Amino acid sequence: SGVSPKKLAEELPVCTILIDDLEDFTELLGVDTDRAACMIREGLTLGIVCIITVHAAKSRGMSGMDKLVRQASNGLVLSSQGGVPIFPVPSMREYPRSGEGLLFKNGVYRRVCLPRYAQGKDI
């Protein structure tokens, strides 16, 4: 609690891949998404951390990057995931309310309070 985005970034491992908005990233890559996914998978096996933000309802493609995201066992759910969820939430009542998230680790989740920064509120 109380960790700013700057402090969080300072605490990340030196080798961290951050992709903010998978849809924009795959559009930028064009046909090279499978190659990029392969490189990221290889990096993960070497201990490189990868953080990808994605609007779950928009992650319906069959590219290597979409498959990589759908196979993730760790993630943070902020709202409904649409018809094809990446992380299984038992019922609509379990989805997080404003200011909350469901933090998944190896398929098991717990409800967490989000810092003000993640809620889109200024300091």
Image (cartoon, helix red, strand yellow):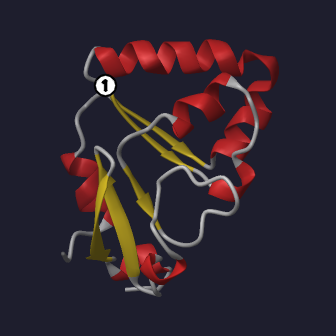
**On screen, residue 95 above or below 102:** below
Left or right, residue 92 beside residue 118: right
Tell me where residue 101 sits by quadrant. bottom left
Residue extending farthest to the front is 90
Check disc 1 and give the amino acid type: Ile
Kindly identify the residue that appears in the image at 74 percent across and 29 percent down.
Answer: 62
Q: How many marks?
A: 1
Q: Does residue 81 appear to the left or right of 29 in the view shown?
A: left
Q: Nearer the viewer, residue 61 or 18?
A: 61
Q: Residue at x 70, y 59 (%)?
A: 83
Foreground pick, 23 / 111:
111
Instruction: Give the percent coordinates (x, y) of residue 41.
Output: 44, 18
Mark 1 surroundings: few (<14), some (14-19) or many (≥20) residues within 10 A: some
* 42 vs 23: above or below: above
Give coordinates of residue 102: x percent, y percent: 37, 68
Q: Which residue is mark 1?
A: 48
Q: Quadrant of the N terminus?
A: bottom left
In which quarter of the view is residue 49 placed?
Answer: top left
Residue 63 vs residue 48: left or right?
A: right
Residue at (31% x, 16% y) in the render: 45
- State left or right for residue 112 relative to residue 81: left
Secondary structure category for the residue under label 1: loop
Q: Residue at x 55, y 39 (%)?
A: 70
Relative height, residue 101 to residue 82 (above, below): below
| Location of residue 7 in the rendering, given as x and y in whole percent from the top left corner | 23, 60
Most foreground residue, 113 or 13: 113
Quadrant holding the C terminus = bottom left
Front-lying residue, 22 or 108: 108
Where residue 96 appears, x then y in whole percent?
44, 79
